[in-house]
Image (cartoon, helix red, strand yellow):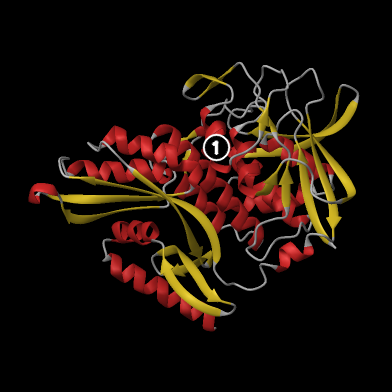
């Protein structure tokens, strides 16, 4: 039997509601605090929980109280303690969290950063936004991943949790955030829904029901959205939201078992390449200032492009030009295409749909004498290493900081990885 989780979101989802549901299922608050404090934020918050009533139903409310201003976690948009994504990733990598919780936390923050970056038109690493950087969001996301790991929720061969989620209520009205008053759903939530092609509906409640943190957790970790999978329910956790609604503001987390998912999970037992559908955009350009191409690259990556590249070509009347190619997931095609039309002089863009094979990969961490470097490791088949590459940005940051060649940092990172693997 395989343990799995189903998130039922009749009144929406937020980070603190996820934590409340997990504590309701038995995840010790002391365990969460102990692990979260390894992130280096112990003096910035206090974590408490209490039982509350919503329309006669009892649920667990988790509070993340910020120490510096004693602010209560009543709204994810109200705090202004910002951090950039690379800083948060370093905090997680250095915290020595359980392996699955670490990987899931990094993935959720990356997903949220990609969405915010697409909204603002900048690269995820350059986003400085309060929802990701806020202490309470860090606690919510990492705490949720710790809780799922503690419960023993199963994972597939690729390492993703066996988590499923219902459709999302859209909510309505407006909310005040760091960038001013915004319509609900806020742009980051809409982008996260778009990135995963999530089912949504209106339940008639004109309030913010799905927050960016809650949407990031669900859209990153959930395998599917909609009706529950075949499941034998063992326990239901109830996580309370902060605001009063016409219906109980409760996230219901079903913890159960299923034998019918075994075949699906076993399909990941070999590490042969996985096939996925991608979209390819191509256009030829011969009348654009080359300086604009760098900006186009950044905008496309911020919109979710998987890869962008150019090739020198000869065009009609012997004019030199470039072939600009964008690879993206189908859900990001329209956004990438809009950027090409807006930022270049092209009058036409070709679209094709292709299949690409993806090797299993994971991000590992190594220590060098100059600092920590993330390393991307890929396998061609079970147990057969295909590629090991240190992350460019980590190497570049350390090279700039210590005034040494980038190639030296890369060499030391590779050396550390191989020594760690063979020791």
Q: Seen from this angle, which residue lies furthest front? A: 316
Mark 1 crowdedness (10 Å alpha carbons): few <14, some 14-19, many ≥20: some
Locate the C terminus by quadrant.
bottom right
Provide residue 112's location: percent of width, then percent of height: 53, 41
The residue drawn where x is 59% and y is 72% is 271
Left or right? Give the position of 243 relative to 417: right
Residue 328 visible? The answer is yes
Left or right? Give the position of 292 relative to 356: left
The residue drawn where x is 38% and y is 73% is 412
The residue drawn where x is 44% and y is 45% is 304
Provide residue 6's location: percent of width, then percent of height: 78, 45
Up-down relation of residue 88 to residue 194 (above or below): below
Up-down relation of residue 278 to residue 192 (above or below): below
Locate the N terminus by quadrant.
bottom right
The residue drawn where x is 79% and y is 36% is 49
- The residue at which mark 1 appears reads as 194
Up-down relation of residue 49 to residue 357 (above or below): above
The secondary element bearing badge 1 is classed as helix
| Rendering quarter of residue 382 | bottom right
| Residue nearest the viewer, comparing 16 with 301 | 301
Provide residue 294's location: percent of width, then percent of height: 25, 45
Up-down relation of residue 411 to residue 43 (above or below): below
Left or right? Give the position of 127 relative to 283: right
| Residue nearest the viewer, comparing 102 with 273 | 273
Left or right? Give the position of 90 relative to 140: left
Residue 134 visible? The answer is no
Provide residue 162's location: percent of width, then percent of height: 73, 55
């Amino acid at each position: 039997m395989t343990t799995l989780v189903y998130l039922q979101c009749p009144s929406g989802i937020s980070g603190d509601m996820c934590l409340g549901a997990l504590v309701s299922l038995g995840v010790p608050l002391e365990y969460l605090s102990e692990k979260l404090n390894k992130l280096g934020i112990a003096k910035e918050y206090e974590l408490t929980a209490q039982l509350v009533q919503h329309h006669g139903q009892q649920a667990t409310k988790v509070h993340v109280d910020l120490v510096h201003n004693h602010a209560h976690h009543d709204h994810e948009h109200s705090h202004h303690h910002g951090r950039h994504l690379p800083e948060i990733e370093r905090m997680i990598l250095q915290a020595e969290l359980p392996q699955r919780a670490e990987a899931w936390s990094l993935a959720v923050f990356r997903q949220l950063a990609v969405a915010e970056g697409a909204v603002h038109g900048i690269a995820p690493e350059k986003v400085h936004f309060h929802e990701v950087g806020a202490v309470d969001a860090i606690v919510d996301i990492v705490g949720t991943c710790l809780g799922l790991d503690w419960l023993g929720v199963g994972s597939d061969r690729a390492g993703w949790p066996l988590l499923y989620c219902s459709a999302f209520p859209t909510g309505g009205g407006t909310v005040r955030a760091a960038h001013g008053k915004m319509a609900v759903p806020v742009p980051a939530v809409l982008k996260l829904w778009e990135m995963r092609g999530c089912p949504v509906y209106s339940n008639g409640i004109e309030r913010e029901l799905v927050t960016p943190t809650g949407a990031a957790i669900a859209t990153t970790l959930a395998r599917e959205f909609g009706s529950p999978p075949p499941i034998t329910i063992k326990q239901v956790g109830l996580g309370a939201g902060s605001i009063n609604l016409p219906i109980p503001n409760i996230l219901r987390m079903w913890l159960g078992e299923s034998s019918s998912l075994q075949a699906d999970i076993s399909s990941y037992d070999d590490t042969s390449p996985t096939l996925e559908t991608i979209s390819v955009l191509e256009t030829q350009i011969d009348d654009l200032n080359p300086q604009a191409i760098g900006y186009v690259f950044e905008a496309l990556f911020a919109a979710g492009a998987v890869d962008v590249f150019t090739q020198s070509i000869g065009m009609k009347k012997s004019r030199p030009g470039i072939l600009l190619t964008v690879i993206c997931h189908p859900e990001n095609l329209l956004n990438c295409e809009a950027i090409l039309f807006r930022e270049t002089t092209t009058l036409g863009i070709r679209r094709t749909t292709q299949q690409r094979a993806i090797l299993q990969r994971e991000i590992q961490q190594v220590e060098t004498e100059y600092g920590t470097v993330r390393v991307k490791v890929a396998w061609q088949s079970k147990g057969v290493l295909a590629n090991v590459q240190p992350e460019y940005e980590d190497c570049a940051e350390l090279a700039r900081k210590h005034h040494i060649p980038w190639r030296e940092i890369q060499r030391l990172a590779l050396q550390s990885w191989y020594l760690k693997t063979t020791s």
